[in-house]
Amino acid sequence: MNKEKIKVIIDSDAGVDDAACLAYAIFDEKLDIKLITSVSGNVGVETTTRNILHILDKFNVDIPVAKGCAKAMQRNSPYAEFIHSVEGLGGYTPPKTVDRPLYSLDAIEAMYEVLNDSDGDIVVLLLGPQTNMGELLLRHPDVADKVKKIVFMGGSPYGIEGYPNHISFNISTDPEAFKIVLNSKIPLAMIPSDMGRLKAHLDEEFVMNKIKGVNKVGDFIYQMYTTYWEPGYADKRIATNDTCAYMYLTNPEIFTVEKVDLDVNTTDMPGKTDVIFNENGKHEFTSAVDREKFLNLISEKLKFFDNFDLK
């Protein structure tokens, strides 16, 4: 008997790693994607929204898309154009505009509608700053009872080379939003930034031999990757941050998962995420991944597209 699909809302600041993640996720038979929402993060919300719509156009998939928040709740939002490019998709240049229409409601109200109509069985996958989720919980605090779990990419409890200790872009961009999410008591699964940069990254050999030239989708992803090599490392590597978060949802068996309690600093070190290991903790934390199995899954997902024509 087939397992029931995981119902999910995907919230994305669609840069390069988001786009690669979406390419895999929108065809994943384990997922039932109810809604995709955009948020400001890697680039501005107008661009992230355009990028999501363009990816769905390019892959000829119909999923509702709602535009979300243009800035953090209490801060000016930084962008990460230095690595994702001005258009957000690295070495790939999308069209300036997309004809595909947006959902009639903004991201906050669209999320509320989808969650409120559910049986409390929807997981929210947060790939960028948590502004939309924070605003949703402020506007509609009752919705917390309708969220099965939040899986999020972000937080750096061990620090990342080249970044201040305990700071990661997604959390430090809007720590106040993450604080609201924490206070909601919704169960969380944290996939820290070091997972995609240090533990499940793609090395140059894998990118050149297992992605480039494999098929049209592989070439699309490779084109984005041509300007997306992770800075600050001696070797050439591609971070897989958002794909790690998605893979945790569909293939949790390849990760080492520990129970934790979480907190976040919003004052002197905004975005510093404290992870307290506690066997009775409310939340989940991925501390390791089977990299070989992760890379094999990437290859399998690309194999799916062997006879696929992109628009």
Image: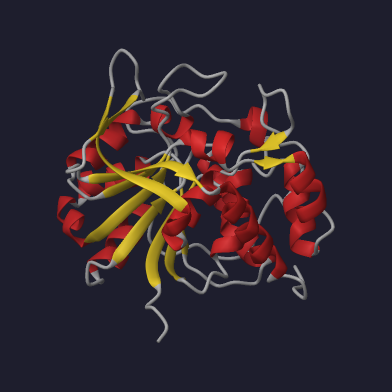
Spot the residue most to the top.
268
- In percent of width and height, residue 301 lies at 64, 65
Q: In the picture provided, is 257 more to the left or to the right than 226?
A: left
Q: Residue at x 57, y 35 (%)?
A: 197
**Quarter of the image where the N terminus is located:** bottom left
Q: Quadrant of residue 276?
A: top left
Q: Residue at x 80, y 56 (%)?
A: 219
Residue 67 visible (yes or no): no
Establish if 181 lies above or below 104.
Answer: above
Q: In the picture provided, is 212 more to the left or to the right than 274?
A: right
Q: Residue at x 67, y 54 (%)?
A: 97
- In percent of width and height, residue 250 lies at 46, 62
Residue 302 visible (yes or no): yes
Camera-side residue: 190 or 134?
A: 190
- In percent of width and height, residue 64 lies at 47, 67
- In percent of width and height, residue 227 lies at 75, 36
